[in-house]
Amino acid sequence: MAPPPSDSPASLRREARDLLLVAAGAVPGALLRWRLEDVGKGLEGVPTGLIEADLVANLVGTFLIGVIAAQRPPRPRLLLLGAIGFCGSLTTFSSWMLEISLALRRGRPDEALAVVLVSLLGGLAAVTLGLVVGRWLGRFRLRR
């Protein structure tokens, strides 16, 4: 039997549900990303500013993506809500590129390179740690 056409009522309901899941995750992710620059202003020893805010957002987001991706069996709704919606809005490629271009414009190629290396290596470490934690949580959930 052929799959239902993509404009069938069931398909449209599924697409609307998926869109709502992504949007429900994207709004808080974007708001958190927007507010990160203010977290710590005035506190000694706490990083502030565009570079630090983006680094925190990207590392937290990639860690959470690792935790979500490690869930077994795969959970499509959690991927839409958490990984694509929330983490997709929290982690920001465009802001990362802005940081790099501003550093280059200020004549600071060393700073631009540091942002690239720390973000990429830190992101890989964070997603790996997230996968480990997610697998551990999955085993814990199965034992209960």
Image (cartoon, helix red, strand yellow):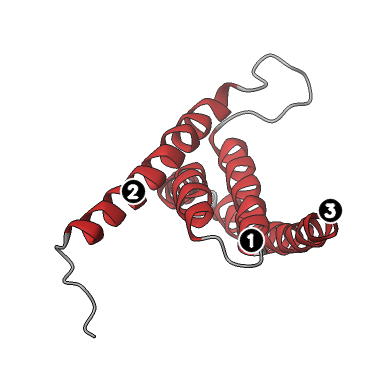
**Marks 2 and 1: CB-CB under 8 Å?**
no
As drawn, the residue found furthest toward the top would be: 42
Residue 97 lies, in percent from the top left, at 44, 52
Q: Determine whether the residue tagged by mark 1 lies in a helix, strand or loop.
A: helix
Between circles 3 and 2, the one closer to the viewer is 3
Residue for badge 2: 17
Residue at position x 51%, y 42% from top?
90
Residue 117 is marked as: 1
Residue 121 lies, in percent from the top left, at 68, 63
Q: Which of 13 and 119 is in front in this view?
A: 13
Residue 140 lies, in percent from the top left, at 83, 56
- Mark 1 residue crowding within 10 angstroms, few (<14) / some (14–19) / many (20+): few
Kindly identify the amino acid type of the residue bearing the numbered disc 2.
Arg
Between circles 1 and 3, the one closer to the viewer is 3
Residue for badge 3: 144
Q: Is residue 112 left or right of residue 88?
A: right
**Marks 3 and 2: CB-CB under 8 Å?**
no
Between circles 2 and 1, the one closer to the viewer is 2
**For marks 1 and 3 on the same chain, the one whose residue lies earlier in the sequence:** 1
Kindly identify the amino acid type of the residue bearing the numbered disc 3.
Arg
Q: Determine whether the residue tagged by mark 3 lies in a helix, strand or loop.
A: loop
State the CA–CA distance, disc 2 to disc 1: 38 Å
- Mark 3 residue crowding within 10 angstroms, few (<14) / some (14–19) / many (20+): few
Kindly identify the amino acid type of the residue bearing the numbered disc 1.
Leu
Residue at position x 59%, y 52% from top?
115
The quarter of the displayed image where residue 2 is located = bottom left
Residue at position x 24%, y 78% from top?
3
